[in-house]
Amino acid sequence: MCGIYAAINNSSVTDFLISGLSSLTYRGYDSAGVAVFNGTGIERRRAEGKLSALSDLLKIQPLDGKVGIAHTRWATHGLPNEQNAHPHMTARVAVAHNGIVENYEKLRVMLESSGYIFESETDSETIAQLITYYLDFGLDSEQALCKALADIEGSFGVVVIFSDDADKLYASRKGSPLILGRSEDGFSVSSDVNAFDESINSITHLKDGDVAKLTPDSFNIFNLEGQSIVRLMQKIEHEKNVSGKQGYKHFMLKEIFEQPQVFENTWRHYYSQVDGEFKLPKLPFNDKDIERLSLVACGTSFFASMVAKYWLEEQAGIPTDIDIASEFRYRNVPCAKNSAALFVSQSGETADTLAALNHCKSQQQPCVSLVNVLTSTMATESDGVMPTLAGPEIGVASTKAFIGQLTTLLVLTLALKNSRAYKKDTPQPNIAEIMTTFPDIMNGYLSDTSHIERVAMDLKHVNNILYLGRGIAYPLAEEGALKLKEITYIHAEAYPSGELKHGPLALVDEEMPVVMIVPPGPLFGKSMSNLREVASRGGKIYLISDKEGISQAKDFIKHGIEMPDVDPILVPLLYTVPLQLLAYYVALYKGHDVDQPRNLAKSVTVE
Ligand code: AGP
């Protein structure tokens, strides 16, 4: 999950490279580097740490040229330092790589025994050395590149420049996304379409096995055997750039406050005022008789899938399996008959989820992706797509995308419920009313976060926290614990409240803070019993519940976070917000980089 950007034009590329990288740092920010052909040879600048370090270096040691490559790194092999920063190069070639060279050790032994000297600990440097090996063997640039890539096992998105073929830029992919962009003045290559600036007027997605050869005025695409491939450029509409923090201290906080709008945009996108019901895009399965659904995702997207399982089974009567993609992809899961697979992903580029999608496609299972990036690989490779309309999410910790996912999954559930006339004699959610009232309920809750800030102040020095929830509140406990972990670095674990007595209750004492999510509903009473189990062992309870819940538990809890009344089906969307705010303010008080927490990246495009 590194970020790659490259460009070739008739004027100068360095500013393009840095501007492109600045939109890719969410993919990794351990180090960054650029390499350009400066007219006589390839010159490189690299810096450890965030992109600003590289920009500062370029101010004192500028680089310029008409073809260049750039990279921002999330370390997989080798420390996050300058020596291991990309681009990796020899005197003849420079390479920026996203992915994992799984056979790099074997290749490195062969190359070192042939006299090639490595300067880094990375797997990626193998690619530069291997291309050089074939160049030294007498092959031309294109042949040397194709031979080297054919030797690579694992995944790659690579951009390559050659010192003795300097009017060309090469790009190729196997498993890691790369998109070509064309402007009036030349071509760019990026890991993510959102990194293209307004000068790019058309794009095309490279597919696995494609090799692109670019000059300022032309592009050719062929496979590793040299056979020509046609990829059509499509016009690109640049989203009105709503980036920038717009007065918020962090993107994450801005994105939390955008959630009411995300809900409304997504709900309206699917709701037909004319028919008073949801209109789904064409789906590759029969909504009336589908017998089973399988939801596959990672991280926060998996917890959105977990919420959806409760909805789909309770509201639409559809048995639903949920799987973490990195587990699913290696289990060789037999696809149930008359079933469909749904892949939930903000980026649409998560390697594990993509691999799971490919597994299901290989079994001819209908595949639908619920993604926030419509031009993503997942979207282009699925049989059906349901957008989540959250807009670009910059904070590594996912918030508004989660709300977009929940909204889309709820729309899907209610649409399937309606088309299957499931439990049609029971009270139906009033979808018209929900659309008009819920954004205001969410905005109302967000209008005063002082109570959350006080709880965060209480928790900022703890080392461990338990999150408990029952029924549909359990996935919220998991998501709340993940939010806290990933930006505060506090160890947080989530459990189904009913599971506590089977072991985890041993963790509870006066030192253990416990966040309990107890919405009104059929499990309220049982959850209150679990709360008293915790209280009787001295646990410090922070209760998220409605007015009645807080009132009933007031003698047993350290702090009550009161939630406004809401349609039960919307509880997962509303009760997520205090969990997001709690994680945000604890991280803020701990002085952490909230938007780019350590060790992480926004899109995990390697396994
Ligand atoms: C969530 O806060 C994390 N950033 C992470 O768990 C993320 O949800 C996961 O990597 C999946 O990403 P995706 O939705 O882009 O597939």
Image (cartoon, rainbow, N blue to C red):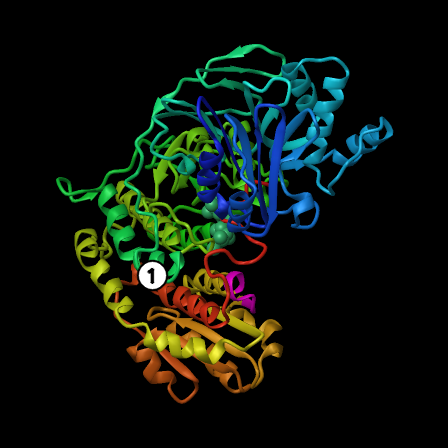
User: Count of labels shown?
Assistant: 1
Residue 115 point in image, percent of width and height: 84, 28
Mark yes or no: residue 324 visible: yes
Q: Is residue 377 magenta?
A: no
Magenta-drawn segment: 485-493
Residue 258 point in image, percent of width and height: 30, 56
Task: Give the residue displayed 48% in from the left and 70% down from the top.
Answer: 468
Task: Give the residue displayed 47% in from the left and 83% down from the top.
Answer: 532
Which sits in the foreground, 199 or 333? 199
Extreme residue in the bottom direction: 555
Please tell me in which quadrant of the rendered image residue 606 appears: top right
Quarter in which the N terminus is drawn: top right
Extreme residue in the front direction: 60
Mark yes or no: residue 497 visible: no
Specify whether 603 is left or right of 368.
right
Please tell me in which quadrant of the rendered image residue 272 appears: top left
Secondary structure beneath label 1: loop
Q: Is residue 492 magenta?
A: yes
Quarter in which the C terminus is drawn: top right
Which residue lies under the disc numbered 1?
A: 248
As shown in the figure, which amino acid type bears the numbered disc 1? Tyr
Task: Give the residue displayed 41% in from the left and 50% down from the top.
Answer: 394
Which sits in the foreground, 239 or 518? 239
Extreme residue in the right direction: 113
Residue 500 point in image, percent of width and height: 55, 73
Residue 491 point in image, percent of width and height: 58, 68
- Confirm or reject: label 1 Cβ below 8 Å from ligand 1: no
- Within-10-Å neighbours for mark 1: few <14, some 14–19, many 20+: few
